[in-house]
Image (cartoon, rainbow, N blue to C red):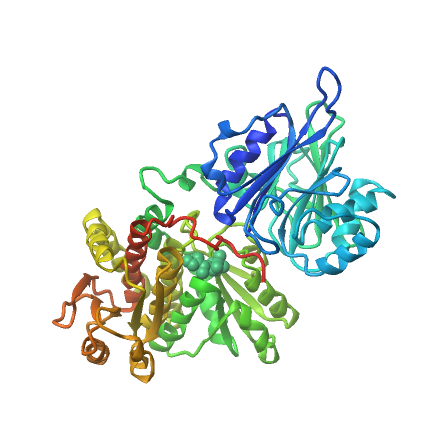
Amino acid sequence: MCGIISYLGNRKNAGKLIVDGLKKLEYRGYDSFGFVEAVPSTSSGQRNGKFKLTKKVGKISEFPSSTFHFPLSNLALGHTRWATHGKVNRANAHPHLSADRKVAVIHNGIVENHAALRKELQKKGVQFASDTDTEVIPNLIAEFLKRGNLREAVRKTAKKLKGRFAFVAMVEGEKKLIAARNGSPLIVGIEKFFPKSDDRLISKIDGSAFFIASDVPAFLNFTRDVVYLDDGEMVEIEPSPKKDHFHAHFFEIENGDEIKKRVISIDWKAEKAEKGDFAHFMLKEIFEQKETIERALNQDERQIEKVAGLIRKSFGTFFIGCGTAGKVCATAEYLFAKIARRHVNVIFGSEFDTQEPFLTERTLLIAVSQSGETADVLEAYKIAKKRGVQTVGVVNTEGSSVARHSDVVLPVNAGMEKAVASTKATTAQLAILTLLAYAVAGKLDEGRQMLAEAASQINDLLNPRYSEHLEKIARKIKNVESLYIIGKAADYPMALEAAIKLQEVSYIHAEGFAAGELKHGPLALISRGTPLIAFVPTGEYRADVLSNVAEVQARGGRIIGVSAENDDLFDEWIRVPNVGNAQPIVNIIPIQLLAYHLAVLRKNNPDLPRNLAKSVTVK
Ligand code: F6R
């Protein structure tokens, strides 16, 4: 939620850097955006460090850089918003200024006690200009600045805030950026890092320029040297006594003590985050599944065996995830039962707190997350850590909070996923959980072989003709009001996942059911022409699922069968290869394509669906 980026350094086009960075962060939020540049003194000496504020409603990608006039500036901050408090309008867009217009702040997260803080400030005569929770932050800083320096003002402000947040502040006339984190991600990028020794664990870091952003892609064109801020930490960037150098200094929010942070060189490639010849990131990422599933299998064998050992030893294994990742977790229940004859618990991240009474040091928590920053998952981690539970992260984003706080990490290796709707990360996660089930059964090699075979079948399947076939089906159903998806066993969570994919990009009402459940109620929703997508297996359960399909067909439903074999009941047949226990991975791919084509045909932007954002860092 909400993308944030700020810059202080030697370059004189800070405003342009911020706008370019925000365009890379748009997947985080895209209802409005804004930035502040500190304008240095002019020949008349009038604008020494004065703020130039720009705010717009809409997607930043729809505004070419020529829209803006960028003054010379080496200090700026910007924000792309996903609204939490307050409508989408210019006043609520960030950055927010203090009432005296001296402090500018960008913020990601939610200030839970904003109403009380607002009242407190109003009593002191502060007038508010927006409906946001954020606006209390610059005003608190401005109040504390009356009696102290910026670092202390920010520290005291951060201590007063309740909830999950990350914010960056600057003050008119001061060449400084200062940021604090508690719950939402914040990463410092160092352009031209000047280490004093080989030691990368340092409290004061020298560089030619610094970025502070919510995500790495915002500054990936400039540096791969980063410091991840942890909860309860803050950073101050200012000019160093050395000419043309700046430094970053790290502190604890609680008591202001200096802390040492590690500079990490990350292995991300900027070009992978571009969409190339594809019309949209979603389509590009669907097609990348030709390689990503194989890459996911390329796990360190010792780590997989280690996690398998932890599962065997545990008294209660919980798989947790949210949204699509939650549906991936739900397949684990079936896969582990079938392949490893082992029961595992599955629960959404936001529900995990209800299980606290059952957590002990013998419990194992396996979190599945693309971003590694989902607040509901991180809250679950807090509870788990409190109870001494061991944690395993199946994570796509290197250096993310889940990756850093897990005892063991199984990297998803899908590469950056930019489209809001998850596709390639989903199938890579499914592959890893399937592999893990085989490892628990003591059959890791067999699992790897089976999955490698499935990956090669997916490579053959994903071609333009297949996509055209899905587009044709999409044309036939593009105007329906509702559609339903059914599956049995591990295909049931995939029916739920198919529904999410269709809902989020096509905006058609879609719902997934366990195949045998239709007759217990939802069958009443079927009328002439209602589409039913059915995952129909070839072996075990085929007869069962086909009888459920027949019940829908008898009531006029239009049947779209996803199966390795055709059947007379199908009005449309979506062919998929028969890949045994990897079937859920293969089955979801045509539905991703179908959702994509429906979105395009209905004139929706599949990469940036309405009301959503890529990583959900609020509870
Ligand atoms: C849907 C989708 C979301 C995410 C969910 C969890 O396509 O992408 O449902 O799966 O918000 O996000 P991560 O995996 O980043 O924890």
Whether residue 109 is situated above or below residue 143 in the rendered picture: below
In the rendered structure, the answer to whether residue 256 lies left or right of residue 603 reads right
Query: Residue drawn 45% across and 66% down?
Result: 326
Q: Give the tally of numbered discs.
A: 0
- In the rendered image, residue 125, in percent from the top left (x then y), is placed at 82, 49
Please indicate whether residue 326 sits to the left or right of residue 168 in the image.
left
Residue in front for this viewpoint, 333 or 185: 185
Q: Is residue 98 visible?
A: yes
Determine whether 223 is above or below 595 in the image: above
Q: Which residue sits furthest right?
A: 147
Above or below: residue 147 compared with residue 7: below
* Residue 410 can be seen, yes or no: no
Viewer-proximal residue among 290 and 607: 607
The x and y percentages for residue 386 are 66, 70
Q: Is residue 470 left or right of residue 428?
A: left
Point out the residue furthest to the left here: 568
Q: Residue furthest top?
A: 43
Q: Quadrant of residue 490?
A: bottom left
Quadrant containing the C terminus is bottom right
Kindly identify the residue that appears in the image at 20 percent across and 69 percent down: 559
Q: Is residue 204 above or below residue 115?
A: above
Q: Position of residue 487 (x, y in %)?
A: 29, 73
Q: Nearer the viewer, residue 508 or 261?
A: 508
Q: Nearer the viewer, residue 581 or 357?
A: 357
Judge left or right: residue 198 versus residue 334: right
List x then y, in percent, for residue 230. Answer: 65, 52
State which quadrant residue 563 falls in.
Answer: bottom left
